[in-house]
Amino acid sequence: MRTAKLLIASVLAFGLGIAAASAAETPKVPTQKWAHTGFFGTFDRAELQRGYQVYKEVCAACHAMHQIRFRNLAGIGLSEAEIAALAKEYEVTDGPNDEGEMFQRPARPADRFKSPFPNQQAARAANGGAYPPDLSLIAKNRVGGENYIYALLTGYKETPPAGVTVMEGMHYNEWFPGHQIGMAPPLSADRVTYADGTKATLEQHAHDVSVFLAWASSPHLEARNSLGLKVMLFLFILAGLLYATKRKVWRNIKH
């Protein structure tokens, strides 16, 4: 019995030690200014469209967004005609047809974003065994949300700090847990030429794609904020009416 208790205590201590070490290796990322945060936050449509451009031209080569359909891009300000034209740039697998065979066709607005790889095994084979995470909910699934995404994208250092040895095939990143990441720096100045003429700095690329991924994780954020404001206004008016009614009722009661 005593041996079992000691074994359990050892396992717990080992687990807590690993958790503490992991926490110590995970730096707290700095907070950026975002137009969509706060009770009255709204997404900047220009930022969203630039962010989608960065995702499409850079991130989509490795990272899927299975939860997003082309028609959802109406939420970033694209028209139905623009979405239909954009979807037609891709071919998706459909079927079976009358002969029982699968076939390729141009994508439609109702289709999901096309994955860069046919399956997870192909994705791992193309990325040295690592599986590029789906970015649909990345802003929700990572502590720090869009702040973490921005910090990660801008945190690469060509030269690691003194005394730090970077393993072969890895890259030093100031904000990645453990500071060594297999993904090469995806962004750089002028990597994407913005359609609206915005200066394409590394920081601008990182900011815009972080906003787009935040929107993808919470596409109904503005509707929720609007509803919350209406509810608060309703409750404020209701409280005022109830208070006025209470005073009127008690004024007519003789003590």
Image (cartoon, helix red, strand yellow):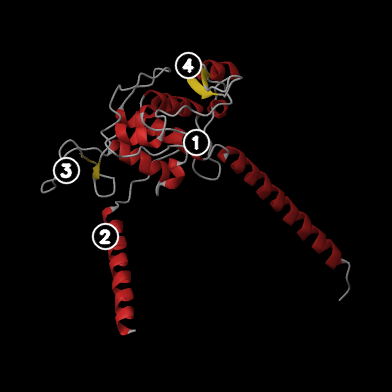
- For marks 1 and 4, the one nearer the N-term is 4
Give x and y (percent) for residue 30.
34, 46
Which secondary structure, mark 1?
helix
> In the drawing, does residue 123 fall left or right of residue 235?
left
**At x 28% / y 36%, what residue is drawn?**
183
Q: Are marks 1 and 2 in contact (CB under 8 Å)?
A: no
Q: Residue furthest left?
A: 163
- For marks 1 and 3, the one nearer the N-term is 3
Q: In the rendered image, which residue does mark 1 sit on?
A: 216
Q: In the rendered image, which residue does mark 3 sit on?
A: 167
- For marks 1 and 2, the one nearer the N-term is 2
Location of residue 248 with respect to 150 vertically, above or below: below
Q: Which mark is residue 198?
A: none
Q: In the rendered image, which residue does mark 4 sit on?
A: 89
Residue type beneath disc 2: Ala
Q: From mark 4 to mark 2, how far is it between C-alphas?
A: 47 Å
User: Considering depth in this image, is 133 or 171 the residue closer to the camera?
Assistant: 133
Eye-nearest disc, 4 or 2: 4
Q: Quadrant of the N terminus?
A: bottom left
